[in-house]
Image (spheres, helix red, strand yellow):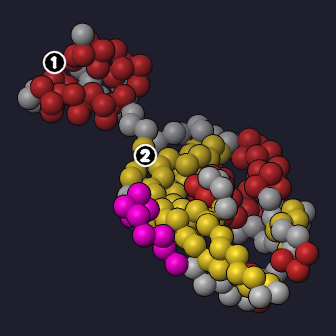
């Protein structure tokens, strides 16, 4: 197994994956529809990733938009106003060869989460992760979402400074990246420092973390 590269591993997983059924019911009444849940995707993918030595995770997320939206509906002559929270997130999802961690593939997904409470961002993250796995492994759900028209609802943005478009990226830096940043902050030449400490491409994250602690001490 160790001789397989990340492309071969992901290809093998794709070949073994079957169509994932839509076992999740969303909404009620006329607005009810079937969907593939995140659990369905994970239950299908996780055993095969373990079998072929692939680890996948969201390496970074960027909030592209965050708004409070307002809509109106009329029933029996009565107008009802509804406030909805919308978040749009970009997710970079990484698939790593566990036998050779420096070898990986990344895919980028964009997802929107809309909720009447405060779950818009959580929904967006869940959708982004789910579709990253579905597209990377070419998982079929048995139908095409373009066959169904979206509900025609007119939204307006609530006028408030708190709802202006925001952009923020969260990414966990490695000990090596943090050490380089600290050297730059202190005005130390990174190349000379690396030679002095004997740092190479094979230096472990633990060693980088140790040196970072010395600089911060």
> Above or below — where is 176 with respect to 150?
above
Residue 187 location in percent, x, y? Answer: 8, 29
Q: Which mark is residue 196?
A: 1
Question: Residue sitting at 44 percent across and 56 percent down?
Answer: 62
Tally of numbered discs: 2
- Whether residue 8 is visible to the viewer of this picture, yes or no, is no
Element on which disc 1 rests: helix
Closest to the observer: 173 or 7? 173
Measure how far apart labels 2 and 1 are at the Cα level: 32 Å
Q: In the image, is 177 to the left or to the right of 193?
A: right
Question: Residue sitting at 73 percent across and 62 percent down?
Answer: 14
Closest to the observer: 6 or 136? 136
Is 208 magenta? The answer is no
Asked whether the residues under the numbered discs 2 and 1 touch, taking CB atoms below 8 Å apart as contact, a structural biologist would say no
Question: Residue sitting at 24 percent across and 10 percent down?
Answer: 217
Start-end of magenta stretch = 156-164
Q: Quadrant of residue 19?
A: bottom right
Q: In the image, is 148 to the left or to the right of 185?
A: right
Residue 183 location in percent, x, y? Answer: 17, 28
Q: Nearer the viewer, mark 2 or mark 1?
A: 2
Element on which disc 2 rests: strand
Q: Which mark is residue 170?
A: 2
- Whether residue 180 is visible to the viewer of this picture, yes or no, is yes
Question: Residue sitting at 83 percent across and 56 percent down?
Answer: 40
Q: Quadrant of the N terminus?
A: top right
Q: In the image, is 206 to the left or to the right of 190?
A: right
Residue 108 location in percent, x, y? Answer: 51, 63
Closest to the observer: 66 or 24? 66
Residue 78 location in percent, x, y? Answer: 75, 82
* Pointer 2 or 1: first along the chain: 2
């Amino acid at each position: 197994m160790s001789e397989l590269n990340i492309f071969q591993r992901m290809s093998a997983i794709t070949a073994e994956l079957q169509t994932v059924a839509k076992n999740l019911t969303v909404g009620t009444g006329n607005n009810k529809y079937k969907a593939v849940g995140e659990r369905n995707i994970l239950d299908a993918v996780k055993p095969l990733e373990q079998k072929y030595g692939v680890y996948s995770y969201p390496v970074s997320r960027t909030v592209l938009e965050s708004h409070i939206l307002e809509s109106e509906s009329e029933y029996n002559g009565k107008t009802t106003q509804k406030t909805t929270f919308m978040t749009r997130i970009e997710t970079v999802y990484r698939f790593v060869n566990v036998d050779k961690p420096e070898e990986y593939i990344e895919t980028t997904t964009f997802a929107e989460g809309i909720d009447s409470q405060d779950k818009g961002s959580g929904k967006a993250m869940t959708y982004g992760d789910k579709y990253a796995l579905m597209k990377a492994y070419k998982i079929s759900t048995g139908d095409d979402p373009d066959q169904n028209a979206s509900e025609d609802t007119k939204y307006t943005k609530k006028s408030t400074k708190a709802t202006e478009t925001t952009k923020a990226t969260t990414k966990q830096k490695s000990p090596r990246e943090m050490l380089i940043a600290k050297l730059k902050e202190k005005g130390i030449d990174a190349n000379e420092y690396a030679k002095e400490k004997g740092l190479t491409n094979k230096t472990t994250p633990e060693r980088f973390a140790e040196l970072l602690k010395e600089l911060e001490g």
